[in-house]
Structures are given as C-alpha cells and as structure tokens.
Amino acid sequence: MTWYHESLYDASSPAGSFWEDDTPPLAAGVDLGPLAGDAQCDVAIIGGGYTGLSAALHLARDHHVDVRLLESGPLGWGASGRNGGFCSLPPSSLGLSGLIRRYGEAEARRFISSQVDAIELVRSLAHDEGIDFRPQGDGTLHVAHSPSRFAALEEERDLLGGKFGVPVALLSRAEVAETSYDSTEQFGALLNKISFGLHPLRFARGLAEAAARRGAKLHGNSHVERWEKRGSEHHLVTRGGTLRARRVIVATNGFTRAPVNRMLADRLMPVLSNIIVTRPLTDDELAAQGWKTERPCSNTRNLLFYYRLLPDRRFLFGARGDLTGKPQDGLRMRALLERRLGEVFTAWRNIPTTHYWRGFVCMTGRLTPAIGQMPDDPTVSFGLAYHGDGVSAAPWSGKMLADMIGAGMPLSEIPEPFRGIPPRIPFPSLRRWYLGAALGYYWLQDK
C-alpha cells in the first residue's frame, strides 16, 4: 500500500529524465535480467541504486562475498538515476547546530568527517573503477535567497569551516555576481570547496558495471513480491523465481514499501522532488543572466531550489513539492517550476524546457539517515534516508554495510546520527497530512 499515486512506483515506466537520454546503455552482461528460477547466495540486496550497488561492489571486491542484487526496475531506476547530481554534504535536515545539540560536538564532527570521506569515496570509485560521471565545478554554492538569510550562511561558515574543518568561503552578493551569476534571489553565498556536480545515472551505471565486473550478480526488473524467513534462510520471491540468502540488505530508500519491510516503511517519509531541464543556452543567453559558473547551486529556501548548468549548457532547475504524485499534479508542478525559473532568472523567462521528471527524497522523523540492523533480526541490514544528499552518502553507506557484513565492523564505528533504526512515524497513514502541514509552514517561512 502506498500513499502516493501508483504510477510513481511503476518500474516498467522510464523516469523521463534528461539523464536517461544522455547515458550509454549498460555493458553486456551487467544486468543479468529478471531473476529466473531458484538461486542462492550469501547476501541478497534489495535495491539497485547507489547504496545497493556500492554494497554489492564492496562485498564482492573487498570481501569476496557471494552477493546478488534485486531491483524492481532497470538498475539505477530510482532516486540514484533521477536526482540533480549534487555530490555534497551533509545528508541531514537537522542543521549543523541541531546535530551538535542532539548528538554532541564529537559525534557531530564524526558525522561531518565521514561525509567528507564519502565525497572522496565517490572520486576514488570513479578513478579505481573507470567511471566517467562527468564531474563539474570547483565546489557548490549555498545561496541566500533573501537578505535576511545571509546571517544563516555566516553561522554555517562558522560551524562547517570553523568547528568541522571543511574548506568553505563566504561570498558577498557582489562576489557571487562577479564569479558565478546574479538573479532576483541571490544575496550572497557560502562556497563549499569539496563538493561538486556529476552525472547521476552515469555514476549509477558505472557502479553497476564495476560490481558486475568484480563478481556481483545483478538482476534488474526483479521486484520482490514476497519475503519469507524459513529457519536461517531468507526467501525473496519475485515473479520469475526465488532467491535464498543468509543475509539481506534493504537499500530501497524512498521506494521502501511492503512487502520489503513494513517495519522500515512506517519509519520513512518519502518527499517528492521535481526537476526541469531547458534546451541548451546560447552564449548571449548566458551573458544576459550573468551566468559564468559550473558550480552547482542550492538556495536557503526551506522548499529548496537547486540548479546547475550542465555540460551541454542546458539548465537544470529543481524544487520540492506535490503531495499526491498524480500525473495531472505533475503537469501543474512542471508549470510552476517553469514559472519560478523565469521569476528567479528573468533573462530566461521564455526559454523552453525539454524534460521534466520527479522522484523521492527519503526522510526520517529524526531528520538524519539510517544505517543498521533490524532489531528483531540482525541478519537484515539497511541503509537509507539521505534527506536529498545521497549522491555521496549512499555509496558510503553501501561500503559501511559491506564492511559490517564482510569484515565484522561494529555498528559503533558508524557516527551516531546514522546509527540504528529511526523512530516509527506516529499513525503512518497520516503522513500526507503531516507533510502538507510542514510544506505550508515552510512556504510561509520562505515568504
């Protein structure tokens, strides 16, 4: 049962993203196709995005574990293949000061440090496994969308750069206009010098090819319809067969739903994020807006705008929104994004868009990600809920899960904000109403 429209879960339907049109197909033999007949392995992974593919790669490559992966659609079909391509930190909606208040400065520092490592892991995976994900930008910009929000960037600089040692620089509105761009919602920015942009689906398919090359067996179009535990074995039943395994990793993120694991599904809040992409912009059009950067940008709105210039000069513009997932509401979201693009970047008011798509950001009630084992069954592990910053956090989580299973790394090695199962959302069937109230509140704050 889902509370978004069923069309969002239809794995036979392409996302409709620009990334799908701009990514070569998987090499032959990477996706073995739907699971057929009975099979057995040591570790079964449910979910073929960054977390699952990274776990499969590291289990097979580093720990020589017999691993198979099941994905409902094509590999990388979910959020890993349809996000904005921001390789950045932190994967939390709690805020830096909130992390310190809840977990203490030492654990907050461990959390941020781990995600600096996560960004470096993405770079090293690309180097070691020959993944061409088209990196862009010498950092990312967090932009004040109004004069009053610049003070929040000053606090962010003091915490991220001062307490946590991340290389950052605070730029005035004039400095951003001189080096990057200007707009109706640009009042200075914080430059994070370690983050960058990439092509998300090329990264996902690169991880898949690396995992298969290292010995993992990957099955796309293999939705788990039933999950049973018989003695010490898990039986994952798909339309075409049954996979038996001693251990299971759940890496389904915002697409988590029964029968994969009801206990997990009731603890997650999937939130829709929407993206439009324009046709390629000309030199004159870029100059008219003063755009001169490849740095990906996001702003300080609670209902985030995020945007970047792609390698072929298309402009990507995204935002949260829509409570239903119905196709007609998707059309309204596209029109809203096109209107807001023209209001923020007035020189591009009439630039046509060529692509629109959407997918899930996954959140928890505690506003931090989750890595751990199920309380009632330690043979089931999970890694998910990256709060819109999973491009680096998810592959890192997959590696942590692989190290826990393959090398016996204790859960205590994981920073506390990640650690363990998140609390159950009260009355999960009311999540749409909770989210609607939150969106209304955030809209008023942004205004």
Image (tube, grey):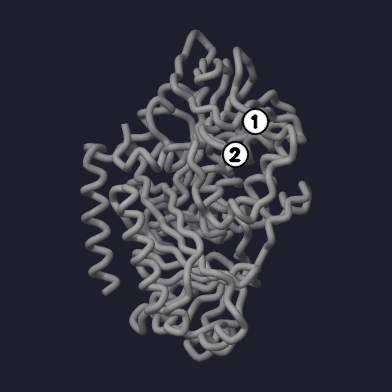
Residue drawn at 67 percent across, 40 percent down: 208
Instruction: Give the percent coordinates (x, y) of residue 173.
Output: 47, 87
Q: Are marks 1 and 2 in contact (CB under 8 Å)?
A: yes
Q: Is residue 208 visible in the rendered structure shown here?
A: yes
Q: Is residue 197 above or below residue 213?
A: below
Instruction: Give the percent coordinates (x, y) of residue 18.
Output: 56, 57
Quarter of the image where one finds residue 37? top right
The residue identified by callout 2 is 75
The residue identified by callout 1 is 218
Residue 385 is tagged as none
Residue neighbourhood size for the residue with mark 2, other residues' Cα within 10 Å, grouped as few (<14), some (14–19), many (≥20): many
- The residues bearing labels 1 and 2 have C-alpha atoms spaced at a distance of 8 Å
Mark 2: amino acid:
Leu
Instruction: Give the percent coordinates (x, y) of residue 158.
Output: 48, 74
Q: Is residue 114 visible in the rendered structure shown here?
A: no
Residue drawn at 54 percent across, 43 percent down: 77
Residue drawn at 60 percent across, 78 percent down: 293
**Closer to us: 115 or 39:** 39
**Closer to us: 331 or 219:** 331
Query: In the rendered view of the protein, which quadrant contains the N terminus?
Result: top left
| Disc 1 secondary structure class | strand
Give the left or right position of residue 97, taking residue 61 as reference.
left
Residue drawn at 64 percent across, 69 percent down: 312
Mark 1: amino acid:
Leu
Sequence-wise first label, 1 or 2: 2
